[in-house]
Image: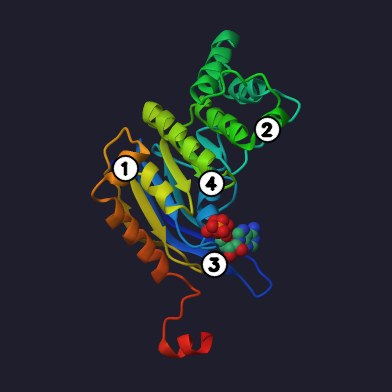
Amino acid sequence: MNKYLEIWQLNKTFPSKKGPYTVVEGFDLSLRQGEFVSLIGHSGCGKSTVLSIVAGLSEMTSGTLILAGKELRGAGPDRGVVFQAPSLLPWMTAFDNVLLGVNQVMSDASEQERKDLVAYYLTLIGLKDAMHKLPAELSQGMRQRVGIARAFALNPKMLLLDEPFGMLDSLTRYELQQVLIDLWSQDQKTALMVTHDVDEALFLSDRIVMMTNGPRARVGETLEVTFPRPRNRTEVMEHPDYYRLRERLISFLEEHDIRKPTQPDAAAAVA
Ligand SMILES: Nc1ncnc2c1ncn2[C@@H]1O[C@H](COP(=O)(O)OP(=O)(O)OP(=O)(O)O)[C@@H](O)[C@H]1O
Protein backbone atom coordinates (compact mmCIF):
# COMPACT_ATOMS: atom_id res chain seq x y z
CA MET A 1 0.00 0.00 0.00
CA ASN A 2 1.30 3.41 -0.99
CA LYS A 3 0.80 5.29 2.29
CA TYR A 4 -0.13 8.97 2.10
CA LEU A 5 -1.36 9.52 5.64
CA GLU A 6 0.19 7.31 8.29
CA ILE A 7 -1.10 7.23 11.85
CA TRP A 8 1.23 5.04 13.82
CA GLN A 9 0.82 3.87 17.41
CA LEU A 10 -1.27 6.88 18.35
CA ASN A 11 -2.00 7.26 22.06
CA LYS A 12 -4.07 9.93 23.74
CA THR A 13 -4.48 10.26 27.49
CA PHE A 14 -6.56 12.97 29.12
CA PRO A 15 -6.13 13.93 32.76
CA SER A 16 -9.29 13.27 34.78
CA LYS A 17 -10.35 13.51 38.42
CA LYS A 18 -9.95 9.74 38.70
CA GLY A 19 -6.47 9.82 37.15
CA PRO A 20 -5.20 9.63 33.57
CA TYR A 21 -7.83 8.44 31.06
CA THR A 22 -6.43 6.76 27.96
CA VAL A 23 -8.96 7.26 25.16
CA VAL A 24 -7.01 5.71 22.28
CA GLU A 25 -4.01 3.43 22.49
CA GLY A 26 -1.96 1.82 19.74
CA PHE A 27 -4.17 3.31 17.02
CA ASP A 28 -2.68 2.46 13.62
CA LEU A 29 -4.19 3.56 10.31
CA SER A 30 -2.84 4.37 6.86
CA LEU A 31 -4.62 6.02 3.93
CA ARG A 32 -3.62 5.87 0.28
CA GLN A 33 -3.53 9.10 -1.69
CA GLY A 34 -7.03 9.85 -2.98
CA GLU A 35 -8.70 7.34 -0.67
CA PHE A 36 -11.91 8.15 1.23
CA VAL A 37 -11.93 6.46 4.63
CA SER A 38 -14.66 6.66 7.26
CA LEU A 39 -14.17 6.12 10.96
CA ILE A 40 -17.17 4.62 12.69
CA GLY A 41 -17.72 3.53 16.28
CA HIS A 42 -19.85 4.08 19.34
CA SER A 43 -20.28 7.51 20.85
CA GLY A 44 -17.32 8.43 23.02
CA CYS A 45 -14.92 5.82 21.62
CA GLY A 46 -12.49 8.50 20.45
CA LYS A 47 -13.26 9.14 16.77
CA SER A 48 -13.17 12.94 17.08
CA THR A 49 -10.10 12.70 19.29
CA VAL A 50 -8.22 10.91 16.49
CA LEU A 51 -9.50 13.36 13.85
CA SER A 52 -8.60 16.45 15.86
CA ILE A 53 -5.09 15.09 16.48
CA VAL A 54 -4.62 14.52 12.74
CA ALA A 55 -5.95 18.06 12.17
CA GLY A 56 -3.34 19.35 14.62
CA LEU A 57 -6.03 20.84 16.86
CA SER A 58 -5.23 18.53 19.75
CA GLU A 59 -1.90 17.10 20.84
CA MET A 60 -1.24 13.39 20.93
CA THR A 61 0.31 11.84 24.01
CA SER A 62 2.55 9.68 21.84
CA GLY A 63 2.67 8.30 18.32
CA THR A 64 3.68 9.39 14.84
CA LEU A 65 1.73 11.15 12.09
CA ILE A 66 3.06 11.39 8.57
CA LEU A 67 1.33 13.13 5.66
CA ALA A 68 2.84 12.97 2.16
CA GLY A 69 6.16 11.84 3.61
CA LYS A 70 6.44 14.62 6.20
CA GLU A 71 5.92 14.32 9.92
CA LEU A 72 2.95 16.43 11.02
CA ARG A 73 3.34 18.94 13.82
CA GLY A 74 0.44 21.25 14.68
CA ALA A 75 -2.32 22.49 12.39
CA GLY A 76 -1.67 23.68 8.84
CA PRO A 77 -3.35 24.52 5.53
CA ASP A 78 -2.36 21.08 4.20
CA ARG A 79 -5.40 19.72 6.08
CA GLY A 80 -8.88 21.10 5.39
CA VAL A 81 -11.28 20.49 8.26
CA VAL A 82 -15.08 20.39 8.03
CA PHE A 83 -17.01 20.26 11.29
CA GLN A 84 -20.76 19.77 11.93
CA ALA A 85 -21.24 23.51 11.56
CA PRO A 86 -18.82 25.81 9.73
CA SER A 87 -17.44 28.78 11.63
CA LEU A 88 -18.32 31.64 9.30
CA LEU A 89 -17.76 35.29 10.09
CA PRO A 90 -21.31 36.67 10.36
CA TRP A 91 -20.52 40.09 8.87
CA MET A 92 -19.00 38.63 5.70
CA THR A 93 -20.81 37.11 2.71
CA ALA A 94 -20.38 33.44 1.85
CA PHE A 95 -18.01 34.55 -0.92
CA ASP A 96 -15.87 36.70 1.37
CA ASN A 97 -15.75 33.98 4.03
CA VAL A 98 -14.24 31.56 1.51
CA LEU A 99 -12.04 34.27 -0.01
CA LEU A 100 -10.59 35.07 3.42
CA GLY A 101 -9.05 31.61 3.68
CA VAL A 102 -8.02 31.52 0.01
CA ASN A 103 -6.22 34.88 0.38
CA GLN A 104 -4.20 33.49 3.28
CA VAL A 105 -3.26 30.22 1.63
CA MET A 106 -2.80 31.33 -2.00
CA SER A 107 -0.90 34.56 -1.67
CA ASP A 108 1.00 33.82 -4.90
CA ALA A 109 -2.16 33.85 -7.06
CA SER A 110 -3.54 37.12 -8.45
CA GLU A 111 -6.62 38.70 -6.86
CA GLN A 112 -8.70 37.74 -9.90
CA GLU A 113 -7.49 34.13 -9.80
CA ARG A 114 -8.41 33.87 -6.13
CA LYS A 115 -11.88 35.33 -6.73
CA ASP A 116 -12.44 33.02 -9.70
CA LEU A 117 -11.48 30.04 -7.57
CA VAL A 118 -13.94 31.01 -4.83
CA ALA A 119 -16.75 31.54 -7.35
CA TYR A 120 -15.89 28.22 -9.01
CA TYR A 121 -16.22 26.18 -5.81
CA LEU A 122 -19.30 28.04 -4.55
CA THR A 123 -20.95 27.44 -7.92
CA LEU A 124 -19.98 23.75 -7.94
CA ILE A 125 -21.43 23.33 -4.48
CA GLY A 126 -24.74 24.84 -5.59
CA LEU A 127 -24.49 28.39 -4.23
CA LYS A 128 -24.19 30.30 -7.48
CA ASP A 129 -27.14 32.53 -6.66
CA ALA A 130 -26.47 32.83 -2.94
CA MET A 131 -22.74 33.44 -2.75
CA HIS A 132 -23.12 37.12 -1.91
CA LYS A 133 -25.48 36.52 1.00
CA LEU A 134 -24.54 36.79 4.65
CA PRO A 135 -24.48 33.58 6.74
CA ALA A 136 -27.65 34.68 8.56
CA GLU A 137 -29.46 34.75 5.22
CA LEU A 138 -28.50 31.13 4.46
CA SER A 139 -30.08 27.90 5.69
CA GLN A 140 -28.03 25.54 7.84
CA GLY A 141 -27.51 23.30 4.81
CA MET A 142 -26.33 26.24 2.70
CA ARG A 143 -23.90 27.31 5.43
CA GLN A 144 -22.53 23.80 5.49
CA ARG A 145 -22.09 23.99 1.71
CA VAL A 146 -19.97 27.12 2.27
CA GLY A 147 -17.83 25.18 4.76
CA ILE A 148 -17.30 22.35 2.28
CA ALA A 149 -16.55 24.75 -0.59
CA ARG A 150 -14.00 26.51 1.62
CA ALA A 151 -12.27 23.24 2.50
CA PHE A 152 -11.91 22.32 -1.20
CA ALA A 153 -10.98 25.83 -2.35
CA LEU A 154 -8.00 25.90 0.00
CA ASN A 155 -6.64 22.92 -1.95
CA PRO A 156 -5.37 20.98 1.08
CA LYS A 157 -3.48 17.71 0.81
CA MET A 158 -6.32 16.05 2.66
CA LEU A 159 -9.79 16.60 4.03
CA LEU A 160 -10.80 15.84 7.60
CA LEU A 161 -14.55 15.70 8.13
CA ASP A 162 -16.07 15.41 11.60
CA GLU A 163 -19.72 14.38 11.20
CA PRO A 164 -20.14 17.00 8.47
CA PHE A 165 -23.85 16.26 8.01
CA GLY A 166 -24.67 15.51 11.64
CA MET A 167 -26.80 18.61 12.18
CA LEU A 168 -28.82 18.43 8.95
CA ASP A 169 -32.25 16.97 8.29
CA SER A 170 -32.18 13.74 6.30
CA LEU A 171 -33.14 15.22 2.93
CA THR A 172 -30.47 17.93 3.13
CA ARG A 173 -27.99 15.33 4.37
CA TYR A 174 -28.60 13.12 1.33
CA GLU A 175 -28.26 16.10 -0.97
CA LEU A 176 -25.00 17.22 0.59
CA GLN A 177 -23.56 13.71 0.64
CA GLN A 178 -24.07 13.65 -3.14
CA VAL A 179 -22.54 17.13 -3.48
CA LEU A 180 -19.53 16.06 -1.41
CA ILE A 181 -18.97 12.86 -3.36
CA ASP A 182 -19.28 14.68 -6.69
CA LEU A 183 -16.71 17.28 -5.59
CA TRP A 184 -14.48 14.59 -4.15
CA SER A 185 -14.67 12.55 -7.39
CA GLN A 186 -13.44 15.57 -9.27
CA ASP A 187 -10.58 16.54 -6.92
CA GLN A 188 -9.81 13.07 -5.45
CA LYS A 189 -8.69 14.51 -2.14
CA THR A 190 -7.57 12.01 0.44
CA ALA A 191 -10.34 12.13 3.05
CA LEU A 192 -10.87 10.89 6.59
CA MET A 193 -14.42 11.27 7.87
CA VAL A 194 -15.97 10.58 11.26
CA THR A 195 -19.58 9.46 11.10
CA HIS A 196 -22.23 7.60 13.08
CA ASP A 197 -24.22 6.85 9.96
CA VAL A 198 -23.67 3.41 8.45
CA ASP A 199 -25.38 4.27 5.13
CA GLU A 200 -23.43 7.50 4.81
CA ALA A 201 -20.17 5.60 5.37
CA LEU A 202 -21.13 3.00 2.75
CA PHE A 203 -22.15 5.60 0.20
CA LEU A 204 -19.03 7.74 0.49
CA SER A 205 -16.13 5.50 1.47
CA ASP A 206 -13.52 3.30 -0.11
CA ARG A 207 -12.88 1.81 3.30
CA ILE A 208 -14.68 1.90 6.64
CA VAL A 209 -12.63 1.61 9.80
CA MET A 210 -14.53 0.38 12.84
CA MET A 211 -13.17 1.48 16.21
CA THR A 212 -13.41 -0.58 19.37
CA ASN A 213 -14.88 1.08 22.44
CA GLY A 214 -12.76 3.20 24.72
CA PRO A 215 -10.92 3.36 26.95
CA ARG A 216 -7.85 2.31 24.96
CA ALA A 217 -9.81 2.27 21.69
CA ARG A 218 -8.08 1.15 18.53
CA VAL A 219 -8.94 -0.09 15.06
CA GLY A 220 -11.18 -3.11 15.42
CA GLU A 221 -12.08 -4.13 11.89
CA THR A 222 -11.78 -2.66 8.42
CA LEU A 223 -14.28 -3.04 5.62
CA GLU A 224 -13.41 -2.49 1.94
CA VAL A 225 -16.22 -0.79 0.01
CA THR A 226 -15.77 -1.51 -3.67
CA PHE A 227 -18.95 -0.06 -5.20
CA PRO A 228 -18.05 1.44 -8.58
CA ARG A 229 -17.51 5.18 -8.86
CA PRO A 230 -18.92 7.65 -9.68
CA ARG A 231 -21.66 6.66 -7.26
CA ASN A 232 -25.28 7.52 -6.94
CA ARG A 233 -27.40 6.44 -4.02
CA THR A 234 -29.85 4.22 -5.89
CA GLU A 235 -27.12 2.23 -7.61
CA VAL A 236 -25.20 1.84 -4.37
CA MET A 237 -28.25 0.63 -2.46
CA GLU A 238 -29.13 -1.82 -5.23
CA HIS A 239 -25.61 -3.25 -5.36
CA PRO A 240 -25.62 -6.97 -4.46
CA ASP A 241 -22.99 -6.39 -1.70
CA TYR A 242 -24.81 -3.48 -0.03
CA TYR A 243 -26.78 -5.37 2.61
CA ARG A 244 -23.94 -7.77 3.38
CA LEU A 245 -21.57 -4.86 4.13
CA ARG A 246 -24.27 -2.98 6.06
CA GLU A 247 -24.97 -6.08 8.11
CA ARG A 248 -21.27 -6.48 8.96
CA LEU A 249 -21.07 -2.88 10.19
CA ILE A 250 -24.19 -3.19 12.29
CA SER A 251 -23.04 -6.51 13.75
CA PHE A 252 -19.70 -4.98 14.73
CA LEU A 253 -21.46 -2.07 16.43
CA GLU A 254 -23.84 -4.44 18.22
CA GLU A 255 -20.97 -6.64 19.36
CA HIS A 256 -19.30 -3.54 20.79
CA ASP A 257 -22.42 -2.05 22.36
CA ILE A 258 -21.42 -1.46 25.97
CA ARG A 259 -25.08 -1.33 26.97
CA LYS A 260 -25.60 -4.87 25.71
CA PRO A 261 -25.26 -7.55 28.42
CA THR A 262 -22.50 -10.04 27.59
CA GLN A 263 -23.25 -12.74 30.17
CA PRO A 264 -26.50 -14.38 31.26
CA ASP A 265 -26.01 -13.02 34.79
CA ALA A 266 -25.62 -9.51 33.47
CA ALA A 267 -28.73 -9.95 31.29
CA ALA A 268 -30.68 -11.03 34.33
CA ALA A 269 -29.39 -8.05 36.27
CA VAL A 270 -30.53 -5.66 33.53
CA ALA A 271 -33.93 -7.38 33.36
N1 LIG B 1 -10.58 17.62 26.35
C1 LIG B 1 -10.95 16.49 26.93
N2 LIG B 1 -10.69 16.24 28.25
C2 LIG B 1 -11.02 15.09 28.83
N3 LIG B 1 -11.67 14.07 28.18
C3 LIG B 1 -11.96 14.27 26.89
C4 LIG B 1 -11.63 15.47 26.20
N4 LIG B 1 -12.06 15.35 24.91
C5 LIG B 1 -12.63 14.13 24.81
N5 LIG B 1 -12.57 13.48 25.99
C6 LIG B 1 -13.07 12.15 26.26
O1 LIG B 1 -12.51 11.28 25.29
C7 LIG B 1 -13.47 10.29 24.94
C8 LIG B 1 -13.61 10.26 23.44
O2 LIG B 1 -14.23 11.48 23.00
P1 LIG B 1 -14.49 11.76 21.44
O3 LIG B 1 -15.21 13.04 21.34
O4 LIG B 1 -13.21 11.60 20.70
O5 LIG B 1 -15.44 10.53 21.08
P2 LIG B 1 -16.29 10.28 19.76
O6 LIG B 1 -16.13 8.84 19.42
O7 LIG B 1 -15.95 11.27 18.71
O8 LIG B 1 -17.75 10.55 20.32
P3 LIG B 1 -19.08 11.06 19.56
O9 LIG B 1 -19.36 10.02 18.52
O10 LIG B 1 -20.11 11.07 20.64
O11 LIG B 1 -18.79 12.41 19.00
C9 LIG B 1 -14.76 10.60 25.69
O12 LIG B 1 -14.82 9.79 26.83
C10 LIG B 1 -14.58 12.05 26.07
O13 LIG B 1 -15.25 12.32 27.27
Residue 6 visible from this viewpoint: no
Q: Which circle, 2 or 1, is nearer the viewer?
A: 1
Query: Tag 2: residue type?
Result: Leu
Residue 76 lies in quadrant: top right
Lower sequence index among marks 3 and 1: 3
Q: CA distance from mark 4 to mark 3?
A: 21 Å
Q: Position of residue 44 (x, y in %)?
A: 55, 62
Image: 179 above or below 216: above
Residue at the spot of label 1: 236
Q: Which residue is mark 4?
A: 162
Alpha carbon of mark 3 to alpha carbon of mark 2: how far? 33 Å
Q: Position of residue 264 (x, y in %)?
A: 41, 88
Task: For mark 4, give the secondary structure.
Answer: strand
Whether residue 252 is visible = yes
Asked which secondary structure carries label 2, the reply is loop
Question: From the viewer's perspective, is the residue at label 4 or at label 1 nearer?
Answer: 1
Q: Is residue 77 left or right of residue 248?
A: right
Q: Are marks 3 and 2 in contact (CB under 8 Å)?
A: no
For marks 2 and 1 on the same chain, the one whose residue lies earlier in the sequence: 2
Q: Which residue is drawn at the image coordinates 46% and 46% (left, top)?
A: 193
Q: Is 133 situated above or below 229?
A: above
Name the mark on residue 22.
3
